[in-house]
Image (spheres, rainbow, N blue to C red):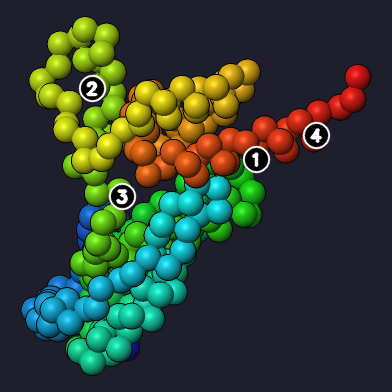
Amino acid sequence: MNFVEMLSDIKELNSYIEQEVDRRIKLKAKPCYRSEQIDTIAQSLSKAQGEFPRIPYNRTTATWNDEYSDLDITLHKIRPVLSKYELAFTQWCEITTDGGTILHTMVMHGSGQWLESRIKIAPVRNDIKTFDSVMADHKRQQCFSLLGLTVEGDPKDDHAEIAMNDTLDEIATGKDAVVKRPQKAYESLTDQQLNELEHELDGYPDLGEEILTKYKLRCLSDMPQTKFRFCIEQVRKFKLYRNEKRPMR
């Protein structure tokens, strides 16, 4: 190989390196959440959304009896429709350089086009049961979000009332606020129910705080009547359990 040929190869190599570096810089600067073209997958997904069946509640939480639809029944209901329109749904995890976990959720089409969402998994405690619980909830929520699924009567769809708790607290303390308290869509506890609940919680302030946190309440009187009986029963169970575990004097 003569000098001219070597020089030509070096120029081609440098050009390739510059293009590859530029491509990787762009990918790093702006994560890609969709294929370059999405017209085909958008058409198939729009048809699938028109045929998705209603997703029913099939589970209740063990502690507070909240209803929800788990991922298994959700996918069981929609897989036939996805397959009909050449759509595939998949999820996987990525471990980041700082040791974090990113959940990837992707919808792919037979044409090769795709859509993706990502969310960081951040459990409040560093144990496998907590991690699995948070992961399962995020997998279900990402599935609903990416595919455009809904559940009738979803308690989380509350007109942003929970998100406005800080503003409502400011109103209660007399501070200026630019929003008004949203009207409740449920019946709160009666005076008799409130007195009964406060009686059960007398001497157990931590249980009262746990109830407020669980139901996102500013005060016990804001609790929905539909949650009252179950809440009373759970408080009594917790008290009985604690009394049995209390050491003898």
Find the distance from the CA under tag 2 to the CA under tag 4.
Answer: 40 Å
Q: Secondary structure at mark 4?
A: helix
Tags 4 and 3 touching, CB below 8 Å: no
Residue flagged by tag 2: what amino acid is it?
A: Thr
Extreme residue in the bottom direction = 84
Extreme residue in the top direction = 174
Q: Which residue is mark 2?
A: 167
Mark found first going from the N terminus, 3 or 2: 3
Q: Which residue is mark 3?
A: 155
Tags 2 and 1 touching, CB below 8 Å: no
Residue flagged by tag 3: what amino acid is it?
A: Pro
Find the distance from the CA under tag 3 to the CA under tag 1.
Answer: 25 Å
Q: Which residue is mark 4?
A: 245
Mark 1 vs mark 4, foreground winner is 1
Q: Is residue 114 visible?
A: yes
In the picture, the quarter occupied by the C terminus is top right
Q: Position of residue 228 (x, y in %)?
A: 44, 38
Mark found first going from the N terminus, 2 or 1: 2
Tags 3 and 1 touching, CB below 8 Å: no
Mark 2 vs mark 4, foreground winner is 4
User: Going 35% across and 59% down the picture, which residue do you hit?
Assistant: 141
Q: Position of residue 242 (x, y in %)?
A: 73, 33
The answer to whether 229 is drawn above or below residue 58 in the figure is: above
Mark 3 vs mark 2, foreground winner is 3
Q: Which residue is mark 1?
A: 237
The answer to whether 225 is drawn above or below residue 144 in the figure is: above
Mark 2 vs mark 1, foreground winner is 1
Find the distance from the CA under tag 4 to the CA under tag 3.
Answer: 35 Å
Mark found first going from the N terminus, 4 or 3: 3
Tags 2 and 4 touching, CB below 8 Å: no
